[in-house]
Amino acid sequence: MGRFVDARVEALPAEALAELESLLDLPDAAVYRWLSGAEQPPVERDTPLLRQIIAFHRHDGPIH
């Protein structure tokens, strides 16, 4: 998630920053499985921010 944070952290609203911090507190292995597409995230974690991070790393959407 580091490249996403480097590219987007300045533009994230406070609410998204709080959500990002909560993602960073989760076990790395779980978040990696979501980002890699190996597993679907749980409903409570399937948020617009997580989808942005996934798209950023898959290049499904705009990179910048």
Image (cartoon, grey):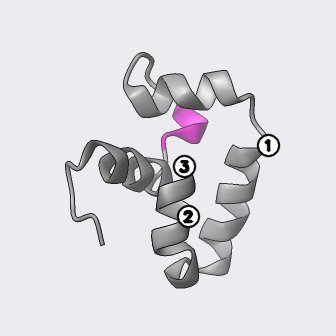
- The amino acid type, in three-letter code, at marker 3 is Met
- State the image quarter where residue 30 is shown: top right
- The amino acid type, in three-letter code, at marker 1 is Asp
Q: Is residue 59 left or right of residue 45?
A: left
Q: Residue at x 59, y 31 (%)?
A: 31
Q: Are marks 2 and 1 in contact (CB under 8 Å)?
A: no
User: Observer-nearest residue: 21 or 6?
Assistant: 6
Residue corresponding to mark 2: 5
- The amino acid type, in three-letter code, at marker 2 is Val
Q: Residue at x 60, y 67 (%)?
A: 16
Q: Is residue 22 left or right of residue 9?
A: right
The residue furthest right is 25
Classify mark 3: helix, strand or loop.
loop
Name above or below for residue 12 compared with residue 26.
below
- Tell me the magenta residue range: 41-46
Q: Position of residue 20 (x, y in %)?
A: 65, 57
Name above or below for residue 8 compared with residue 29.
below
Question: Considering only order in the chain, which callout, 1 or 2, is on the residue closer to the N terminus?
Answer: 2
Q: In the picture, which quadrant includes the C terminus? A: bottom left
Nearer to us: label 3 or label 1: 3
Name above or below for residue 24 compared with residue 40.
below
Residue 17 visible in image? yes
Query: Does the magenta-highlighted stretch encompass residue 42?
Result: yes
Residue corresponding to mark 1: 25
User: Observer-nearest residue: 18 or 1?
Assistant: 1
Q: CA distance from mark 3 to mark 1?
A: 12 Å
Tag on residue 1?
Answer: 3
Q: CA distance from mark 2 to mark 1?
A: 15 Å
Q: Are marks 3 and 2 in contact (CB under 8 Å)?
A: yes
